[in-house]
Amino acid sequence: VHRLLVTSEDADLRRYVRITLERAGYAVNEARGLTDALSRLAGTDLVVWDLAHDEAAEQVSRAVANVPLVVLASGLPHERAAGRATLLKPFDPGELVELCRAVLHQPTA
Amino acid sequence: VNDDVSIRGIRFGFLFVVALFALVGGFTLLTERHTNERIDELVRRAGERSHLIDRIRLDAMLLETAVSEHINAQTDEDRGAADEKMEEILSDIEDARDSYTQDLPPGETEAWTRFSTTSKALAEQVRTAVRFSNRRQAERARKHLEESITPVTEQLDELADQLSAKDAEETQKTLHHREDLRARTLELAAGSSVLAIALSLFVAFRVVKLLGRQRQTIAEQLDELARRNRELDAFASRVAHDLVSPLAPLKGYLTLIRRSKTVAEPSVIEMLTLAESSAGRMGELVEALLRFCRAGNQAKADAQPTDLEATVTTLLLEVSQTAAANHVQLDRQLETGVRVAMPPQLLSSVAQNLLSNAVKYSAGRSGAKVSVRVFAEKADAVLEVTDNGMGMSAEAQRSLFQPFFRAPNARALPGHGLGLATTKRLVEAHAGTISFRSAEGAGTQVVVRLPRARELTAAQPALEPRLAQGSR
């Protein structure tokens, strides 16, 4: 069973993501922010990161280093960074599960 | 206020300079003309006087001859003829003398008085000689002619010379006076020109300074505008983030409930659908708000040019289904090779807004038709969308571009009132314009003009613009 870590400042969103992913059969942990997330990173197969309004995807990507990453963002469709696994909120729960599955199964560099 | 005062001052300065030039020019011309007239008159009179003096001189010589003839005359008849001739000459001298005295300059009277006295003395002496001649005292008369008349004639000649010289001197003086006057006028003109130039320079300096200050003000205002746009953008991002975060679980849970298939009661399923629809609308509204705020951002200088015809063709494919479902005919007249400096997704959202509005507001009317035209006009790329739909009242037209405005006759139709406001901001942020014409019940035409992209690199040679026409 893959171990996933959901990071968000928003408790409601954290819980929603956890419930959605647990229903898909993953083991899910929660973190409240960057420091919290980094302390729980060991043994994590995938991080689902809800970007705070002052966070950039690049910054988060550097912080989690080689742990695969799915980013939850707010913005306009055409503003999404190319080549990064990003979901724009609000998203369909099915889409989230599929994206996580795809990232987990892609060959890592 | 300060600038207003400066502008008024500058205007006054210019008027003053122009008035000064006009005044100096007018004065110079007038003085010159007046002086010339005076000089002409003086020269003419001097010529006349010189002529009169010559006449008197000649008369004096003729008088000598006539006196001789009188003395030598043998008969009373000859003597009478000589008498007559002498009287004639004497009266001529008197006439000339009178003419000369008219218009005589005041300073010249002394010389003239002597000349006049001498000519009167000559007449006296001639009459004395004639008296001797009449009394047959020829020898005495001849002697009188030699001793009295000839010297007086010579004196008269000499005085005439003096008078002529004096006249010439007078004329010379007048001419000098004219030169002096001209020099003075020139000095005055030069002086006032220097003053005018100095004033002009001062005014120009003030204008340049004022323009500089205004340019600075404009630059500051543009900076302020850019800063506010950035603020609005930051605010919008924050709002979008904060609104979307609770919306994500809301929509997500509704989806999960629906997919759990634990709800069987039809009325509950209907409520679920309504809740999903409301959540969906809220998502759209947040996105529209974000689009509106972001639309004001300055265009990127390195934006790749986008083909207008290709963008519109793609959109028409998307819209055609909705149009067909609503029995709206789509006409197109698209010129190829018209490119604008705007990212594809933004250009697409502009065209999409116009097209979907046209279809939305003409749907359901009999013979509903939407015409799309793309063409190049001078430096502009033009997108023109015309419908024969419901149109707008004059009052609605005034508020058309205001965010969240919805025309009263369109409120029953879906929409949030941000589409056209966003389109306007987008178009204007890319140095374009948007305009429209509308009549209630007859339809609406919206025209977007964007500057055409310069480029066309070597790999993409400029295509001969060709009209792709057709309708569907």
Image (spheres, coloured by chain):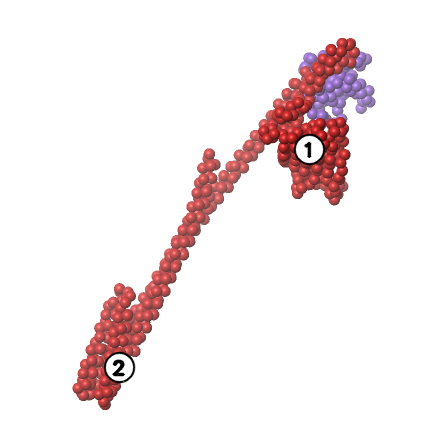
Chain colours: A purple, B red
Task: Give neighbour class at mark 1: few <14, some 14-19, many 20+ (Cα, 10 Å).
Answer: many
Q: Report x, y in % for residue B322.
A: 74, 27
**Residue situated furthest bottom in the rendering:** B74
Residue B138 in view here: yes
How many angstroms separate mark 1 from mark 2 (CA)? 117 Å
From the viewer's side, name the closer residue of A52 and B168. Answer: B168
Of discs 1 and 2, which sits in the foreground?
A: 1
Left or right placement of residue B302 versus residue A24 in this view:
left
> Given the image, on which type of amino acid does mark 1 rest?
Asp
Q: Report x, y in % for residue B443.
A: 66, 32
Q: Report x, y in % for residue B121.
A: 21, 76
Left or right placement of residue A80 versus residue B141 in this view:
right
Which residue has dot 1 on it?
Answer: B387
At mark 1, the secondary structure is strand
Task: Give neighbour class at mark 2: few <14, some 14-19, many 20+ (Cα, 10 Å).
Answer: some
Task: Please give the name of the residue rendered at 36% of the width and 65% of the height, measured from the top-left corner.
Answer: B40
Which residue has dot 2 on it?
Answer: B85
Chain containing mark 1: B
Chain containing mark 2: B
Q: Report x, y in % for residue B106.
A: 26, 64
Q: Is residue B197 above or below residue B284?
A: below
Left or right placement of residue B217 versus residue B80 in this view:
right
Task: Please give the name of the residue rendered at 73% of the width and 43% of the height, measured from the top-left corner.
Answer: B465
At mark 2, the secondary structure is helix
Task: Please give the name of the residue rendered at 23% of the width and 90% of the height, measured from the top-left corner.
Answer: B74
Left or right placement of residue B162 versus residue A62 in this view:
left
